[in-house]
């Protein structure tokens, strides 16, 4: 609780039950849970009735004190006096002043609700000293939707589709992966109790791995949310999970009756993580992040039942420069035309809070100011993970949230990112990875059910089941296929040749990117929006490859191809090309077959 309290900045316990819990972990909880809560409230009411007369006398003498003491669950009285948390209010202003990339990094540092991201299919085993550029690949051909065109241009790697093996992922086609959680059968509720209520002794390792992977993919799990089926496993193995996450990654795991929260650390600047609208997938803007932090600053102490219009009013009062953009002035205007006042950034902020179950159902009509929101204060207080109250500014918060000793810092990168390249690490972390090149990745691979791929440039922990990631390549959808084709062609064109230095990134000419994307548009059926807007195709395809760590931008707005990208291209033909000069070694011609003739 200490880390959570100082992370919020000024956490207060609102009036309610003695344990401080005033809201459930999400909506739709079981009737038994509701009954217990109602019984608790009834006990509190009976205790308070004895002092009712004294409270009434205090009301006459001090009306303000009477309102504050009437309980935070009165939606009309306490909503008037919503007070924002100072630390989260500062965070909201930092978001508003940040650039898009810095705002993404600030969200990662302050909330830590990002999922792990790993590459999928494993390549054939190879010596750890082999470069990704020249090692075995996990290439999977994407079928052409139109007639194949003749290969043109220079190809720096020879292709022979008939001779190249396709390395399939660990997940068998048409069946679950090795670490895939089994599907829940429809007949499961009718199974005997002794089958459902397993003690964990039968398959403890598998259950622990499932629980650990679930938390790393979804750091906030509730008993009534979309991942409720894994919540009992988390509670069953809470002690082991708490110890493992703390020892290996330095993460704090808090498990309550209704939710489990894994407090992740930040990933530093340039982490390429962002929040997206739960329904549309639109990336958050700095204004969206600012409204998210502002709303959260008010919800950590809000009443459990809060009118929608009061929340918007309180946001405007707490930070007029953040909440009133495009909004009408005056209470009357708010009540009559709130729908026109709500911009896309506020919509995505409230949608994210509802997705985390901090808020219950949102109004179907944004103008319905009388709609009463259901607030889960316990989950609202569980969202902040970084220390906004201790940081000097946004850059300081991003730096503080990623601080750790070398071993912990490298293990975090291995557990959360697609690949760790030694050239990206500071000297102390590079030295740790060099000394623990085998044992470090192996411990995390065992903990999370991953496969370690060691190459000359670094290490990647792979998830053949393609579950422990928010982005997949190969993946479903036209954009993922276009990005896969793009990276394949880029590797073929700029991959270092045998004899060249294989280490490091390789520059990609802009003309090559445009030419390859033009070929893809000609050869494959793309959505009309991409055919009409090649700039959008370029932007989205490069963004996906960047977020997967396969390319990286330069200060001059160009791109570099990273060594792990070679995993997705056909295996290179490393045989030396025969020379043609007079000093070249002659090749021995194959003798022609003997002629068939009449016997003499």
Image (cartoon, rainbow, N blue to C red):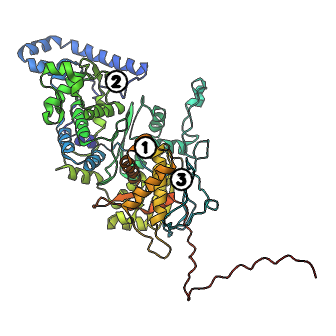
Report helix, strand or loop for mark 2: loop
**Quadrant assignment, res 151:** bottom right
Q: Which residue bears the numbered disc 1?
A: 217
- Foreground: 277 or 296? 277
Give how far across and how far down residue 112 sits, in percent. Answer: 32, 44
- Foreground: 49 or 489? 489
Residue 71 in view (yes/no): no
Q: Residues within 10 Å of mark 1 (few under 14, many from 20)?
A: many
Left or right of 225 on screen, residue 65: left
Per the rendering, the mark at residue 361 is: 2
Per the rendering, the mark at residue 311 is: none
Report helix, strand or loop for mark 1: helix
The N terminus: image quadrant: top left
Q: Nearer the viewer, mark 1 or mark 3?
A: 3
State how far apart marks 2 and 1 are (Cα): 24 Å
Identity of the residue furthest to the left in this view: 61
State how far apart marks 1 and 3 are (Cα): 18 Å
Is there CB contact under 8 Å for labels 2 and 1? no
**Quadrant assignment, res 578:** bottom right
Q: Counting residues from the N terminus, which is met first, the one under dot 1 or under dot 3?
A: 3
Q: Which residue bears the numbered disc 3?
A: 121
Q: Residues within 10 Å of mark 2 (few under 14, many from 20)?
A: some
Q: Counting residues from the N terminus, which is met first, the one under dot 2 or under dot 1?
A: 1
State how far apart marks 2 and 3 are (Cα): 39 Å
Q: Residue at x 35, y 42 (%)?
A: 113
Give how far across and how far down residue 75 sits, in percent. Answer: 22, 19
Q: Counting residues from the N terminus, which is met first, the one under dot 2 or under dot 3?
A: 3
In the rendered image of this protein, does residue 554 appear above or below residue 522? below
Is there CB contact under 8 Å for labels 2 and 3? no
Give how far across and how far down residue 196 sits, in percent. Answer: 57, 30
The C terminus: image quadrant: bottom right
């Amino acid at each position: 609780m200490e880390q959570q309290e100082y992370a919020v900045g000024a956490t207060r316990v609102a009036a309610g039950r003695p344990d401080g819990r005033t809201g459930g972990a999400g909506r739709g909880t079981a009737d038994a849970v509701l009954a217990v809560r109602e019984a608790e409230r009834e006990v509190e009411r009976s205790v308070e009735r004895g002092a009712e007369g004294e409270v009434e006398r205090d009301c006459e003498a001090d009306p303000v004190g009477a309102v504050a003491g009437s309980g935070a669950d009165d939606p009309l009285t306490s909503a008037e006096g919503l007070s924002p948390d100072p630390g989260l209010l500062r965070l909201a202003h930092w978001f508003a002043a940040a650039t898009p990339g810095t705002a993404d990094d600030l969200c990662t540092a302050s909330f830590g609700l990002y999922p792990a991201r790993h590459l999928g299919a494993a390549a054939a085993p190879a010596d750890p000293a082999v470069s990704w550029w020249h090692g075995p690949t996990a290439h999977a051909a994407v079928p052409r939707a139109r007639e194949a065109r003749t290969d043109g241009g220079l190809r720096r790697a020879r292709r022979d589709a008939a001779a190249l093996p396709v390395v399939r992922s660990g997940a068998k086609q048409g069946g679950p992966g090795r670490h895939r959680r089994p599907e829940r059968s429809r007949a499961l509720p009718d199974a005997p109790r002794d089958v459902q209520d397993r003690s964990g002794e039968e398959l403890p390792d598998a259950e622990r791995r499932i629980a650990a992977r679930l938390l790393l993919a979804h750091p906030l799990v509730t008993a009534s949310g979309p991942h409720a089926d894994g919540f009992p496993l988390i509670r069953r193995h809470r002690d082991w999970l708490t110890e493992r996450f703390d020892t290996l990654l330095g993460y704090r795991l808090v498990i309550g009756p209704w939710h489990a929260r894994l407090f992740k650390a930040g990933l530093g600047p340039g982490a390429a993580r962002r929040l997206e609208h739960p329904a549309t997938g639109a990336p958050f803007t700095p204004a969206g992040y600012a409204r998210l932090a502002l709303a959260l600053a008010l919800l950590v102490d809000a009443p459990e039942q809060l009118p929608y219009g009061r929340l918007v009013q309180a946001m405007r009062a707490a930070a007029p420069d953040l909440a009133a953009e495009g909004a009408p002035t005056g209470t009357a205007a708010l009540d009559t035309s709130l729908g026109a006042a709500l911009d896309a950034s506020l919509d995505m902020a409230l949608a994210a809070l509802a997705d985390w179950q901090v808020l219950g159902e949102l109004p179907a009509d944004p103008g319905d100011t009388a709609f009463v929101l259901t607030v889960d204060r316990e989950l609202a207080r569980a969202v902040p993970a970084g220390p906004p109250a201790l940081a000097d500014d946004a850059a300081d918060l991003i730096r503080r949230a990623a601080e750790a000793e070398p071993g912990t810092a490298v293990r975090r990168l291995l557990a959360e990112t697609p690949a760790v390249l030694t050239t990206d690490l500071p000297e102390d972390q590079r030295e740790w990875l060099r000394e623990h090149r085998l044992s470090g990745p192996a411990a995390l691979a065992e903990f999370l059910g991953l496969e370690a791929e060691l190459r000359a440039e670094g290490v990647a922990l792979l998830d053949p089941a393609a579950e422990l990631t928010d982005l997949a390549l190969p993946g479903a959808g036209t954009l993922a296929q276009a990005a896969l084709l793009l990276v394949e062609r880029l590797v073929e064109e700029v991959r270092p040749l045998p004899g060249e230095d294989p280490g490091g990134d390789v520059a990609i000419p802009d003309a090559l990117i445009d030419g390859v994307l033009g070929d893809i548009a000609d050869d494959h059926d793309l959505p009309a929006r991409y055919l009409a807007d090649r700039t959008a195709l370029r932007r989205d395809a490069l963004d996906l490859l960047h977020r997967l760590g396969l390319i990286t931008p330069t200060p001059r707005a160009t791109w570099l191809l990273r060594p792990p990208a070679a995993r997705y291209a056909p295996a290179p033909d490393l045989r030396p090309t025969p020379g043609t000069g007079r000093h070249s070694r002659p090749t021995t011609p194959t003798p022609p077959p003997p002629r068939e003739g009449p016997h003499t």
